[in-house]
Image (spheres, grey):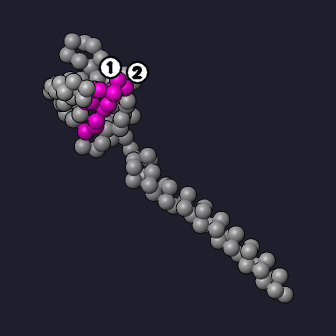
Amino acid sequence: MKAEKIKKWIVNFIVIVAFLIAARFVFFTSSKEVEDGEYSRQTFEDGKYTAEVSYKNTCTGHRNYYDLTVVIEGDYLTTIIFENGGSIGKNKINTEKVNKEGKVLIKAKDGCSEYYIHIQHKE
């Protein structure tokens, strides 16, 4: 009789733990992803935008401000286009998601260059 109670308790415990694990993935993971924008609509259309860019080289201390063109794909800033026609893209910068206010901090893979970008309008 005591063995049956223990067996029933173990089965109930396993069922409850399995339910809690499943509920965590169904409810909490999905909610977090929605909060983070995983399933939300794209904030920015893909394309070129005019942006205010604050540049800082953390290795030399050099700073400057520019109005430049940037490229956004899937809410991620993927390319910075300079006034002279040159550009840097995914091979030289770490792409980051632009927030709803149109701001993003992009760090170059060289470890020194940082670009604080504020999107102004679509070109």
Q: Which residue is drawn at the image coordinates 25% and 12% (left, top)?
A: 85
Q: Residue 12, how many percent across, how many down?
A: 71, 75
Q: Which residue is drawn at the image coordinates 17% and 24% (left, top)?
A: 62
Tag shown at residue 88: 1
Tag shown at residue 91: 2
Q: Residue 70, how many percent across, how many down?
A: 27, 25
Left or right position of 123 against 2: left
Q: Amino acid at mark 2?
A: Asn
Quadrant of the rendered image containing residue 16 = bottom right
Frontmost residue, 61 versus 108:
61
Q: Quadrant of the N terminus?
A: bottom right
Residue at the limit of the structure toward the bottom, as seen here = 1
Left or right position of 73 against 48: right
| Span of residues in magenta | 102-115
Q: Which residue is drawn at the image coordinates 55% and 59% (left, top)?
A: 26
The alpha-carbon separation of the residues under discs 1 and 2 comes to 7 Å
Q: Quadrant of the C terminus?
A: top left
